[in-house]
């Protein structure tokens, strides 16, 4: 760092001197990072901290521990992002088979007695000390990376213009195993997100339209079969029924969605002020620091604050789209598109259920919701996007 | 292959990426639109729902206003009792749901732990009583009879009794000053019912589950004034019912004070004298029924003649109104509503009705004058009067020769009125009545307000009855089947004979009916209060006042005094000349007529006394004693059912009350110092802001 020794010293631009200088030099790694994406994501996490604090401050279990942990998770998430950028997505490409195998192993572990059931989903691993981890969050990443690796291999090598049917089948085969395991948990929310991510991946890979259309019809058909065969647990059917008509049973399943809507609606234009929401302090909405965190924003920060969250998510997705469009290889494009589909759909589902236009599924709001696994996963995703951005040609 | 070889993307991928972008942003726009719809467009609606979500009310009952007598002596007020209550919200926070604390509390109060725990549990369909059916946020009373020692024990060791409070609370007390328990006039309170709560829900003055409501007497008729408005504390609570803040509440307003025109001293004397008179009557032998008089019930009304204000209203049998305080038990209630106790809840002054006997005669006198018979004309007072073979006897079969109507009143000569009534009946067509009969005697009774409530400010007053032609035909239609059935039997007893007669011509006004009616016998029914209004009107120059017990409603701080002004419901149907003549005749009754022997030595010059005695015959029962009197300021009417004659059974009690009012001693001397109320109480007692009462 340059030294300063008085009021009249004028800091001058000293290119490429010292560590900081090297980091900030034109064309350096730090300069090439997508700062709009990074700042938008950080802003979402900061807002998330305030909302987590408000949602949990009246609870007498660990109280402000929630805020502390959320900040800690965010910090770890930033570190994970930095590490991902440092390694670069191309380096990671080599490790994909190993990462994929590790993530599948973890979700298999969930099905063993080591797994923990939370809110009807047997999707957590207990780490002891009250910490749990949800491995399916990481599976989202490894599926995207694995499929991208298979789909882009021949194209990036210049062998083909588009992935052929065999390649697509291989990629889908890779995704099928973890999806089946997650369905066993059952973690329906993650399955839906993964399905969307696969759709994004296939679209971006340039796979033929037949595959895209076929996959969408298969997903719809599969959903119909699952529901009609009664393969869903009762709580999942109930959630969907309550979504269709919340007034049916306002004190039962529809209660949560009703209270969520009351919370958001009562916020009005400017909100009731942070920590002042009566729905929030009264704990009328369940899971308010995680799945229903958007209701805190709606009630306490109003249309302005909740709208800001939408705008920030929009910035993140917009930057991700730019990165996908300007990636230096198809592998990067596919990974970015998978992440867009994942974050985009997960945000839409999470906020949509709080607003009562989507059925309830246990999904956190990226960057904002309390929860380590989700926080780490989305920051790793940002790291991947950043490394794709960093490695694109300077001329672009 | 492509023009941007470095990126490895082709047109298909580029187009699809744009499609993804469009899709993602349209989803975000959808969310934004929905957010706008919920927060901006329907925000107000949801805000309302949110605010109703988490407020719980704790009710602080308003202190009920006192009922004072005319001098400010409380007839009904509130007594502070130490009430120990338990807060359910606090108890439920404990690990054992407060069992330990309640058990300890039971030990201090000397109760069984089981009883205490049952008292604080919430009522639901599966919980039998005892249980608490109020709001779970309301402190639940465990006992209202804690001793100061017990209360201190609880309050000193507050940390050992979390959630338990020992606070003084106000409970109704009927103090019976000067022995005036005034039970039927005051009425009583009992808790509201669910029905009443639902009915009052949308009104300006909604009822709370903790409210007590006036059920009878002035507690009922002035309930709204006395009740005040309960304070409401609103707490914000969370989903689990824990209090997290206080919302805007509503301060309570204590009930207003009601000043009545009752004078507790006079009331006490009236009650005692009535009771004494009834007991005395029970020692008298009735020659007609050949046993002692039953004297089963009685009433005495003392009213201000010039205003209609009730100075005292006694009814017998009576009871202790404090029986209702804190909830009446089943046994006590049964007793108060049983035939054996002869229904002491009834106020005989307004709910007891019977034939008036001769105190009715001021009405046929007026009717005769209005029909054209001169007051000072000569009328035969024979010992009996014969109509078609049926002999109507004079009371005690005395004859007085030719007398005027005034003298007929004085000596209560029946045959004078028989003749007049018979003549009028004949003029109206007799057994074949004209189309529009004049019916002077019936019309006049109605003009005197009979057959209609007086309009007193007490609930459930009865109307009495004037047995005119319409009533007769209605009554016949309702009963003819029974009569005619009995008429067919071959029995020859009195009842069957009457039934036979009634079956055939019960719809008609017969000569006998008209004649009997003219002296206040037969089917006529009046209440003591109706007669008091009539005699009061004769005293005051002819105005019939709506009697009132309430005199003023005074706000709790004493500033707002709302006086209840006397209101009239008409004038007596007589000219001033007739009124004066009747007035003179009634004074004659007291000096040389039927009541003279009871007013011997009365200072008539200083305090002119007017009276009329009555003895009504009731089929199957002993005679009803009636006594109606007035001075220039007061009118007193008394009756004893199955009590004997008017002057015999009732007059001594009435005179005793006059003695007390004016301070007249046994020799008829007036001692102004001993006079309780030589003139009606005009001024109201003063109530200061701190609630103290100053006698006028």
Image: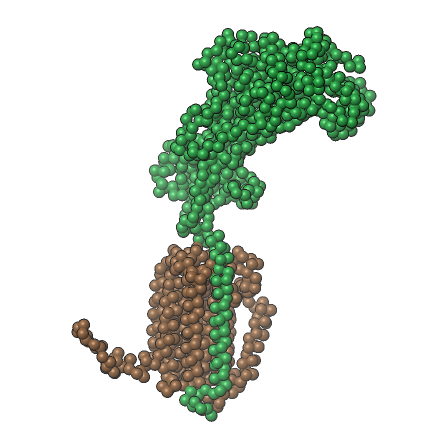
Chain colours: A brown, B green
Residue A112 visible (yes or no): no
Q: Nearer the viewer, residue B319 or B196?
A: B196
Residue B352, percent from left and from top: 62, 24
Quarter-of-image position of residue A80: bottom left
Left or right side of A93 for B643: right
Residue lying at 44% horizontally and 51% vertically, measured from the top left: B237
Residue B73, percent from left and from top: 45, 25
Left or right side of A374 for B496: right
Q: Nearer the viewer, residue A159 or B380?
A: B380
Residue lying at 43% horizontally and 42% vertically, measured from the top left: B251
Q: Nearer the viewer, residue B535 or A91?
A: B535
Query: Vertically, is B251 above or below B500?
Result: below
Residue lying at 37% horizontally and 84% vertically, measured from the top left: A391
Residue A172, percent from left and from top: 51, 80
Left or right side of B58 for B637: right
User: Tag count in the figure?
Assistant: 0
Residue lying at 40% horizontally and 51% vertically, measured from the top left: B244
Residue B193 visible (yes or no): yes
Quarter-of-image position of residue A364: bottom left
The C terminus of chain B sits in image quarter: top left
Query: Vertically, is B212 above or below A119?
Result: above
Name the residue furthest left: A5
Left or right side of B630 for A291: left
Query: Vertically, is B541 above or below A53?
Result: above
Residue A241, percent from left and from top: 56, 63
């Amino acid at each position: 760092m340059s030294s300063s020794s008085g009021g009249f010293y004028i800091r001058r631009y000293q290119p490429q001197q010292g560590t900081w200088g090297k980091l900030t030099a034109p064309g350096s790694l730090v300069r090439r990072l997508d700062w709009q994406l990074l700042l938008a994501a950080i802003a979402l996490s900061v807002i998330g901290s305030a909302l987590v604090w408000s949602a949990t401050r009246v609870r007498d279990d660990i109280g402000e521990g929630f805020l502390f942990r959320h900040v800690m998770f965010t910090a770890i998430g930033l570190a994970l992002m930095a590490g991902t950028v440092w390694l670069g997505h191309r380096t990671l490409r080599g490790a994909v088979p190993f990462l994929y195998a590790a993530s599948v192993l973890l979700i298999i572990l969930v099905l063993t007695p080591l797994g923990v059931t939370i809110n009807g989903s047997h999707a957590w691993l207990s780490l002891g000390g009250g910490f749990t981890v949800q491995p399916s969050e990481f599976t989202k990443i490894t599926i995207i990376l694995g499929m991208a690796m298979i789909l882009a291999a021949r194209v990036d090598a210049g062998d083909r213009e588009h992935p052929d049917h065999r390649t697509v089948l291989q990629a889908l085969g890779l995704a099928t195993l973890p999806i089946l395991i997650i369905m066993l948990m059952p973690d329906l929310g993650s399955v839906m997100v993964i399905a969307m991510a696969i759709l994004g991946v296939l679209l971006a890979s340039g796979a033929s339209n037949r595959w895209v259309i076929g996959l969408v019809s298969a997903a719809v058909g599969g959903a119909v079969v699952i529901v009609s065969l009664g393969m869903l647990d009762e709580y999942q059917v109930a959630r969907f029924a309550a979504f269709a008509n919340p007034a049916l049973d306002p004190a039962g399943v529809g209660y949560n969605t009703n209270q969520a809507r009351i919370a958001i609606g009562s916020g009005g234009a400017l909100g009731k002020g942070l920590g002042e929401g009566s729905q929030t302090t009264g704990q009328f909405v369940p899971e308010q620091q995680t799945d229903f965190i958007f209701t805190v924003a709606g009630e306490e920060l109003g249309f302005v604050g909740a709208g800001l969250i939408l705008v920030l998510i929009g910035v993140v997705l917009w930057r991700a789209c730019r990165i996908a469009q300007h990636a230096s290889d198809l592998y990067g494009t596919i990974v970015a598109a998978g992440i867009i589909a994942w974050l985009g759909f997960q945000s839409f589902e999470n906020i949509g259920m709080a607003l009562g236009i989507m059925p309830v599924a246990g999904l956190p709001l990226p960057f904002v919701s309390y929860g380590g696994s989700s926080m780490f996963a989305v920051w790793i995703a940002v790291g991947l996007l950043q490394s794709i951005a960093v490695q694109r040609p300077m001329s672009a | 292959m492509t023009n941007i070889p470095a990126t490895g993307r082709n047109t298909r991928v580029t187009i699809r990426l744009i499609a993804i972008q469009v899709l993602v942003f349209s989803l975000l726009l959808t969310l934004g639109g929905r957010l706008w719809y919920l927060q901006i467009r329907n925000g107000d609606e949801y805000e309302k729902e949110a605010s109703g979500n988490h407020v719980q009310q704790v009710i602080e009952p308003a202190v009920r206003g006192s009922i004072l007598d005319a001098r400010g002596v409380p007839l009904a007020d509130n007594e502070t009792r130490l009430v120990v209550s338990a807060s359910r919200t606090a108890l439920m926070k404990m690990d054992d749901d407060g069992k330990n604390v309640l058990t300890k509390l039971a030990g201090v109060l000397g109760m069984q732990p089981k009883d205490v725990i049952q008292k604080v549990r919430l009522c639901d369909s599966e919980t039998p009583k005892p249980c608490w059916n109020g709001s779970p946020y309301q402190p639940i009373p465990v006992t209202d009879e804690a001793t100061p020692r017990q209360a201190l024990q609880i309050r000193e060791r507050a940390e050992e009794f979390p959630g338990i409070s020992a606070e003084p609370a106000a409970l109704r007390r009927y103090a019976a000053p000067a022995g005036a328990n005034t039970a039927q006039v005051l009425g009583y309170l009992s808790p509201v019912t669910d029905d009443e709560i639902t009915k009052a829900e949308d009104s300006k003055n909604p009822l709370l589950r903790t409210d007590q409501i006036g059920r009878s007497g002035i507690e009922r008729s002035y309930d709204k004034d006395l009740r005040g408005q309960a304070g409401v504390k609103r707490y914000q609570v969370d989903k689990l019912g824990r209090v997290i803040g206080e919302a805007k509440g509503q301060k309570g307003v204590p009930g207003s004070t009601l000043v009545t025109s009752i004078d507790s001293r006079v009331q006490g004397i009236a009650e005692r004298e009535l009771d004494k008179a009834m007991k005395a009557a029970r020692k008298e032998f009735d020659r007609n029924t050949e046993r002692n008089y039953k004297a089963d019930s009685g009433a005495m009304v003392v009213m201000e003649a010039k205003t209609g204000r009730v100075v005292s209203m006694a009814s017998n049998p009576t009871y202790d109104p404090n029986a209702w305080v804190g909830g009446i038990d089943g046994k006590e209630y049964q007793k108060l509503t049983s035939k054996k106790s002869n229904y002491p809840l009834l106020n005989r002054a307004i709910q007891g009705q019977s034939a008036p006997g001769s105190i009715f005669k001021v009405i046929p006198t007026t009717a005769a004058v209005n029909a054209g018979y001169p007051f000072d004309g000569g009328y035969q007072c024979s010992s009996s009067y014969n109509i078609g073979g049926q002999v109507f006897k004079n009371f005690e079969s005395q004859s007085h020769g030719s007398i005027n109507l005034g003298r007929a009143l004085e000596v209560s000569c029946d045959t004078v009125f028989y003749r007049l009534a018979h003549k009028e009946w004949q003029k109206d067509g007799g057994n074949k009545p004209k189309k529009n009969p004049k019916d002077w005697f019936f019309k006049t009774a109605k003009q005197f307000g009979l057959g209609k409530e007086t309009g007193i400010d007490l609930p459930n007053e009865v109307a009495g009855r004037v047995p005119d032609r319409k009533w007769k035909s209605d009554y016949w239609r309702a009963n003819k089947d029974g009569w005619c059935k009995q008429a067919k039997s071959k029995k020859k007893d009195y009842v069957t004979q009457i039934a036979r007669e009634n079956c055939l011509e019960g719809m008609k006004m017969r000569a006998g009916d008209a004649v009997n009616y003219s002296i206040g016998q037969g089917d006529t029914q009046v209440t003591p209060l109706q007669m008091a209004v009539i005699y009061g009107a004769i005293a005051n120059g002819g105005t019939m006042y709506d009697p009132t017990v309430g005199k003023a409603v005074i706000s709790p701080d004493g500033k707002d005094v709302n006086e209840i002004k006397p209101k009239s419901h008409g004038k007596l149907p007589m000219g001033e000349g007739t009124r004066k003549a009747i007035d003179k005749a009634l004074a004659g009754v007291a000096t040389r007529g039927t009541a003279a022997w009871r007013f011997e030595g009365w200072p008539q010059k200083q305090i002119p006394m007017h009276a009329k005695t009555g003895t009504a015959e009731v089929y199957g029962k002993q005679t009803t004693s009636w006594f109606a009197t007035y001075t220039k300021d007061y009118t007193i009417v008394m009756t004893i059912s199955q009590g004997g004659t008017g002057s015999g059974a009732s007059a001594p009690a009435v005179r005793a009350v006059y003695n007390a009012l004016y301070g007249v001693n046994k020799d008829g001397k007036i001692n102004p110092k001993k006079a309780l109320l030589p003139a009606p109480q005009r001024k109201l007692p003063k109530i200061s802001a701190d609630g103290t009462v100053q006698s006028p």
